Amino acid sequence: MTSKKQADILLVSNNIFAGKYGEDKPFPGIVAIVDNKIAAVGDIAQRDEWIGEDTEVYELGDKVVCPGFSDNHVFFTGYVWKRIGADLSGANTPAEAAKILESFAKTLPDDKPVYGHGLNVDGWSDADKDAAILDKIFGARAVIAYTPDRDFCWLNKAAQERYQITADECWAEVSWRLFKEYLSDKKFAAREYKIFSDLLASRGVTSIKEIGFDTYFGFADILEDFEKKGQLKHRINLVSQPVGAPMNYEYGEECKKRFDSDFIRFMGYNVMVDGEICTQTAAMIEPYEGKGDWKGDEVDYASIEKAVLEADKRGMRCALHAEGDAAVRGAVDIFEKCQKVNGKRDSRHAIIDLEMTHPEDLKRMGELGISAINYFQIIQTNDGFDGFYGEECVGKQRLSNYWAYKRMLESGVNVCVGTDLPLSEPDIPLSLYFTVARKFLDGKPEGGFNKEQGITVAQTLRAWSAGGAYVNFMDKKLGTLEEGKLADIVVFDGDVFTAPIDEVPQIKVEMTICDGRLVYSK
């Protein structure tokens, strides 16, 4: 125990959830913080021992105190992409949208491209979407506006040439030239990261896996500057996702040496494997329902395996994004090959998404030590249960393998969480509603979807905390409330353990502490 007995911050609550494995119930107690570490987690009777003249004491009653949360799949660039430029959400016609873009353009230097977000093209004809409309107004000045789901962008000829994308093929991985462009504005990027940081702090997120395309286009310099100035409100586990160029191992080696602190670390690489079940492009073991022998788009496993084997050989961690059960199996095969070829090591490789999985592959994941980064909040991207595509795509029988969180835990898999921000913004109480009740936002189905694969409140919170710390090699320092660990702590404004599950989503984060500093207070 630290020799300094006066706490800088003392949290007193009837509901301390330490997050340790095997301890599923909160207890009445105190958490004492000295400098940036947890000095004690103990009985309320110890309260007065830690109070000094300068101690900030928080009497929290029944509010739950738990370890800080880790969002293990985040795109800052995507967050900016969702909100950059003119807000077109109020425009209903091409003329209205063009007028807003034209007005916004006048606020920019003449040589700057014009961005827009929130474009609603419902009811637009093909003629309405014609690039010629924008060509006539903006000429050689690039202009591009995205819909909220970024599944369509309205752009002129100059933007098509500048970014090498088309109106219907403008997802993140092909929009990297646009990302590179706006990240080059260092003042803009730094300002946006402060807003992004405040959002995460307000949700209790104290650690992220941040995905940067290729060499991150210089944005890592900004993060390093934030750290030097003591301005980071969360810890960052950087990964590189190759999109515009092959996996850059030299960049990875450089980043491993450069970023190895408790606040910024370089993990390795993120690789896309397959598509989506909802569009029937994800790789499936059995054909899609009613689609003949169609099992999804073909996956170049050989190329992925070659890249991952080399990264593993160099001591890098890889996270493979696999949604269909065949893609998950292919990812497991690749990680198994890594152990056979390069030898076993503490690699902590991971698979992301895992919307549908085969039970045998989950057993293999447990045996091989592969973590599962699940999208606990993915249900909220559906309008409701009636609009859910699962049965239509894979049939009723295979739904038992959908979002199989309980089976993952029973198979010995380290379970953690990602939101794919900006796809979803982290909301831990809402995620509890999905994992425990297994209901969609409309409250359906009544008994929960594939309820057999539901998990408990404690298991969900642990996935957000201890599971996330483990996959990022920080489990000795983070993830649980224990003496000597770094003080990353969250306080909810209610009791997520005893509140009726239908009311849990109304509970919010009251306070977030990162590295012993209060970074958010409601």
Image (cartoon, helix red, strand yellow):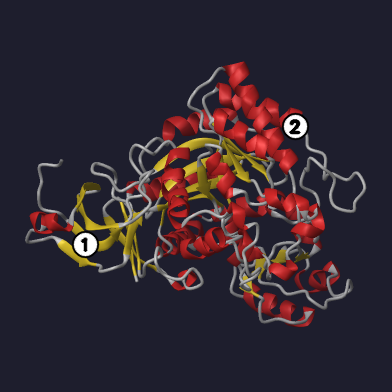
Position of residue 73 in the picture relative to residue 462 (left or right): right
Of residues 502 and 71, the one nearer the viewer is: 502
Q: Is residue 39 visible?
A: yes
Residue 301 shows which numbered tag?
Answer: 2
Q: Residue at x 85, y 52 (%)?
A: 289
Q: Residue at x 68, y 70 (%)?
A: 384
Position of residue 126 in the picture relative to residue 309 (left or right): right
Position of residue 145 in the picture relative to residue 410 (left or right): right
Q: Residue at x 43, y 60 (%)?
A: 194
Of residues 364 and 215, the one nearer the viewer is: 364
Residue 429 position within the rendered picture, expressed as x and y whole percent measured from the top left: 47, 64
Q: Is residue 251 visible?
A: no
Could you tell me how far apart the alpha carbons at marks 2 and 1 are, in whole angstroms?
Answer: 52 Å
Instruction: For mark 1, give the secondary structure.
Output: strand
Residue 129 position within the rendered picture, expressed as x and y whole percent measured from the top left: 83, 71
Q: Residue furthest left?
A: 53
Q: Residue at x 50, y 40 (%)?
A: 414
Instruction: For mark 2, give the secondary structure.
Output: helix
Which quadrant is home to the C terminus? Answer: bottom left
State whether residue 276 is above or below residue 214: below
Position of residue 72 in the picture relative to residue 351 (left or right): left
